[in-house]
Image (spheres, helix red, strand yellow):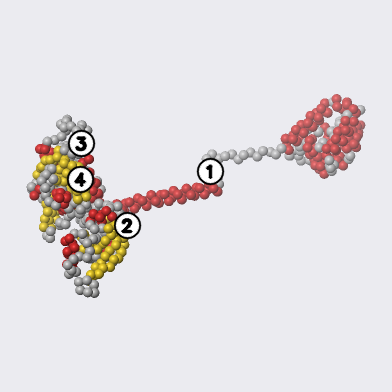
Amino acid sequence: MDENIMHEEPDMPNSSIIPDKESNSSEKEQSVCTENDNIPDDEFIEDTVANTDSSNSSDSSDNKNTQEQLADNTDNDKVQQEYSSCQNLQNQYSQPNPYDHFKQQQMQYAQQQEQYQPYQASGQYQQYQQQYQQYQQYQQYYQQPAPVPAAPKKKGAAVPLTSGQKKIAWLLRIGIILTALVFLYCIISDAVLFRFYTPNNSTSSSYSTDKTDKPVIYREGKPSSYDKYSDKTDGESYTVKEIADMVSPSIVQIQASSASSGGSTGSGIILTEDGYILTNAHVVNGYDKVTITLYDSDEPAPAEVVGYDSKSDLAVLHTEAKDLTPAVIGYAEELSVGEEVVAIGNPAGLRGSVTRGIVSALGRQIRSGSTGFYMDCIQTDAAISPGNSGGALINMYGQVVGVTSSKYGNAYFGGTYEGLGFAISIDQALPIAEEIIAQGYVSGRVRIGITFASMTEPTIQEEFAANFNIDKSPCKEGLLISDISPDCDIANTDLDVNDIILSVNGKKVNDYDQLQEVIKDCKADDILTAQCRRYTFGDEKGELKYKDFTIKFKLMEDTSGDF
């Protein structure tokens, strides 16, 4: 066999070779490949060998072109272009099963291998074999989809929000805006209220309680070295003289007067440096003009009634006088029976009177002469006379432990007794005073709005019978109504003057104490039910008839101080 014969590889399957992306085959090369593809595979190999032999013996231009074509196959790029064109044509006429076609070509190649041994021994065969293997590798590589490089992330680029995140963002914006509006509204409203607001307290006092600074009341207990069972106090207690010198500047004399009611005198305790004074309500209530006189002065200074509470018989005054010495307030609960005390006041207008005594008893429930209300009082044998009302009861440490009141002693016993005086406990009086200073009245007080007398009293029965020109009262129980306040809810009921209230909320009421027992736990706007009776003249002369009826009324808040 001629050594110059070159063996051409059999047709390869489509998956073995990858066409070059930039192959541009000439029309001539495409026509050659087309003609060869139309020839059967067996004939193709034989024709290729024959053409090779003829190229060695002939000098025609066709043989030269064939040899040049075979020689150019060493060029990888050209081989790829030619094979790509041939491959495209072959794909048009390929058999239904490319694998069977390839196996058939392989069998033909194996049968003819022996004929081409000399050709295989040459270096060109190994070269084509290596190229064939390379084509398979290239084809596998290019058949894989080229990876799409990820778009480079821009530094600081915003990440798009989902629909849910957008909703949350909008809600947060709305919340921030609403919070800002509420905050702005609060600032504006506070500024407006601070500038224009004035409290509207329904009190009889003309004194304004709108104070920015809270008054300072000095209060302290007994020294820690005090032993209530021993007289040894390490020199902490004072003598009566020392107490008189120390506390007298804190006690003032009070004069109250009016054109219609005459006048009244009493005492007062200076609570603060800015002019608040504690006294008894009966000393100043009902008077138009009030003045105070300091311990070391003969000139009276004007004072205003801040507020009063007739139920507890306490009142607070205010004066613009300067250089005031406030008293030190102690604790009545630290007192012991038998402990020495000092009373300072102005009995009968005698300023700066000092009396000495002991604590006779503690926790006495004594009723006020003006209202009948019970207060927690300290009993003492220190002399307390008219004019001492509103003065101070002082322990031996110079601390005020009670507010002296002759009114309580007179009401309890119906007269004046030597060695028997009472003072309102400072522990009960101070909270009332502080509330009056703060708002001008004591909160929690209620009133029905009636003035009455007890039908159990013989004198009241006689007056009732005289109104009807009869000898004997037909009723001896209940509360006889003498006046009804028009600003109270009870004025809107059928109750009238000279009617009798027999019971309230199912409980009989014959006097003040029984009525107070019914309403003591009630609050303003509570509804009460009362059973009432009305007497009228009968058909015959001297005959009385009566009619029972029921009313419902609402309790009113009492800010007037009257009780």
Q: Which mark sits nearer the N-terminus, 3 or 4?
A: 3
Give whichever of discs 4 and 1 has the lower sequence position.
1
CA separation in Å, label 1 and label 2: 66 Å
**Which residue lies at the image location 31% right of the left edge and 58% below the top edge?**
506
Of badges 4 and 2, nearer the viewer stands 4
Specify whether 244 is left or right of 374.
left
Residue 526, numbered circle? 2
Q: CA distance from mark 4 to mark 1?
A: 82 Å
Where residue 355 appears, as percent x and y from the top left, is 10, 42
Q: Which residue is mark 1?
A: 158
Q: Which residue is mark 4?
A: 364
Which quadrant does the C terminus fall into?
bottom left
Count residues near mark 2 (Cα–Cα under 10 Å), then give few for <14, some for 14-19, many for 20+. Answer: few
Mark 1 or mark 2: whose residue is earlier in sequence:
1
Label 2 SS? loop
Disc 1 is placed on an element classified as loop
Q: Nearer the viewer, mark 1 or mark 2?
A: 2
Q: Position of residue 138 (x, y in %)?
A: 74, 34
Quadrant of the rendering where the N terminus is positioned: top right
Residue 28 visible to the viewer: no
Q: CA distance from mark 3 to mark 2?
A: 43 Å
Answer yes or no: do the residues labelled 3 and 1 have beta carbons within 8 Å?
A: no
Q: Secondary structure beneath disc 4?
A: strand
Specify the amino acid type for callout 1: Ala
Residue at horizontal 28 percent and vertical 59 percent from the top: 503
Q: Quadrant of residue 104?
A: top right
- Separation of marks 4 and 2 at Cα, in angstroms: 31 Å
- Tell me where residue 156 appears, x and y as whole percent: 52, 40
